Image (spheres, rainbow, N blue to C red):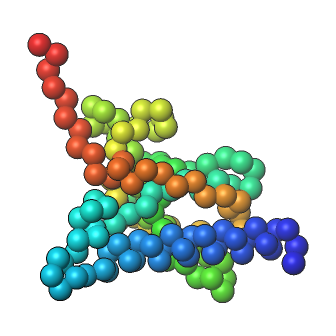
Amino acid sequence: MSIEKGRKHFVCEALYDIKALQDVITNFHSKYYGQLLMKIVGSDTIPLFLITNNGAHLRLLDTGKQFETEYFRIESIDKERCRGTISLLRAYDYEGNETASNADVVRLERTSTEKSIDLSSISAIQLLNPDLLKRKIIVEPKW
């Protein structure tokens, strides 16, 4: 197996595992406690960056809502073709404004925008803190 094919296989497998974990969090239901797992975790999304073969973060544009992001949620994986469907996450700063600066991001918000991507152009995955999806931005007056 070539290095390129092995890396492609690794990325597909890793994203498949992340999707499976999201599904467990979402679909686990106890007859006594309901969706306790999702209540404990606080979100059904594991946010992530996708790193391209040239070492940059993958950035995608939502032309309808006019924003660009490098934050994603895995929606589905086709392991046979090594393709993935991801949804775009919107990034906000502490004032509630959209931001493109990683240093300013304090909250991520799911969107309905999904994109299909060829995973052969992806060399790595970086998971992010799921707390970014459940933070409430509260700006208190200084005085």
Q: Residue at x 66, y 82 (%)?
A: 81
Q: How many marks?
A: 0
The C terminus, quarter of image: top left
Q: Position of residue 12 (x, y in %)?
A: 64, 74
The N terminus, quarter of image: bottom right
Res 117 → quadrant: bottom right
Q: Position of residue 85 (x, y in %)?
A: 51, 72
Q: Residue at x 39, y 54 (%)?
A: 130
Question: Which residue occupies the foreground of this view, 98 or 136?
Answer: 136
Res 99 → quadrant: top left
Query: Can you say whether 62 is above or below 31 in the image?
Result: above
Question: Which residue occupies the foreground of this view, 20 or 139?
Answer: 20
Q: Would you say residue 65 is visible in this rendering?
A: no
Q: Position of residue 45 (x, y in %)?
A: 38, 63
Q: Is residue 114 left or right of residue 94?
A: right
Q: Residue at x 34, y 44 (%)?
A: 107
Q: Is residue 98 left or right of residue 77?
A: left
Query: Can you say whether 110 is above or below 26 in the image?
Result: above
Question: Which residue occupies the foreground of this view, 128 or 64?
Answer: 128
As drawn, the residue found furthest toward the front would be 32
Q: Residue at x 47, y 77 (%)?
A: 20
